[in-house]
Image (tube, rainbow, N blue to C red):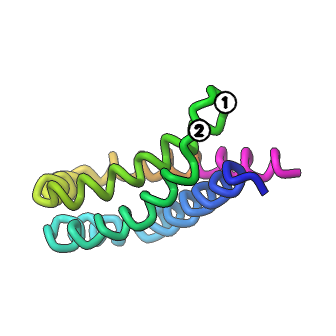
Amino acid sequence: MDISLFLAQVFGLYFILAGTAILIRPSSTMELMQFFSNRNAVFVSGFIALIVGVPLVLLHNIWDGSWRVIITVLVWLTFLKGVVRIIMPELVASWADALVSYSRLMRHMLWVLVIAGIYLMYLGFEWSL
């Protein structure tokens, strides 16, 4: 299987499941933001994102102008998320702290995540047939 198709399926399924789970449990959104307002939690999650992001960047760095660029951008965002969380955990924690008061914005962002996941699942499974 093509790595781009596999990653479209992985990111798509993750976005749908994570976004839907948080939408179904609105209190979990606030709990998640409160968790990430802790500098230590941000720091540790940065290493996890980096462990995932580094191999993904090495495996998928395709800038060919096709839909695969979407996957490449997601891969790089995963890597950069890890770097930013490790280098500037206080900044990320302050962002999470600020987002707690914007629950409507968070819901909209989650819906965008779910829709993006549906699109990625479509790409991943449509092209693999």
Q: Position of residue 55 (x, y in %)?
A: 49, 60
Q: Position of residue 5 (x, y in %)?
A: 72, 51
Query: Callout 2: helix, strand or loop?
Result: loop
Q: Characterize the local packing of mark 1: few (<14), some (14-19) or many (20 or more) Cα atoms within 10 angstroms.
A: few
Is 105 or 45 nearer to us in this picture? 45
Magenta region, residue range: 117-129
Q: Quadrant of the N terminus?
A: bottom right
Determine whether, in the image, residue 32 is placed left or right of residue 57.
Answer: left
Q: Residue furthest front?
A: 58
Q: Disc 1 and disc 2: Cα gap in Å? A: 9 Å
Please tell me which residue is depicted at 54% across the width and 43% down the height of the picture. 61
Residue that badge 1 annotates:
66
Please tell me which residue is depicted at 54% across the width and 57% down the height of the picture. 15
Determine whether, in the image, residue 2 is placed left or right of residue 79.
Answer: right
Is 106 or 74 nearer to us in this picture? 74
Query: Callout 1: helix, strand or loop?
Result: loop
Please tell me which residue is depicted at 41% across the width and 54% down the height of the picture. 78
Residue that badge 2 annotates:
62
Question: With respect to residue 107, does 23 lie above or below?
Answer: below
Instruction: Report whether residue 97 is seen.
Output: no
Q: Position of residue 60 (x, y in %)?
A: 57, 48
Magenta residues: mostly which secondary structure?
helix
Q: Position of residue 118 (x, y in %)?
A: 65, 50
Question: Contact (CB < 8 A) between labels 1 and 2?
Answer: yes
Q: Residue furthest top?
A: 65
From the image, state whether disc 1 or disc 2 is nearer to you: 2
Please tell me which residue is depicted at 24% across the width and 52% down the height of the picture. 84
Q: How many marks?
A: 2
119 drawn magenta: yes
Instruction: Report whether residue 84 is seen.
Output: yes
The disc labelled 1 sits on which kind of residue? Answer: Ser
Query: Which numbered dot is residue 125?
Result: none
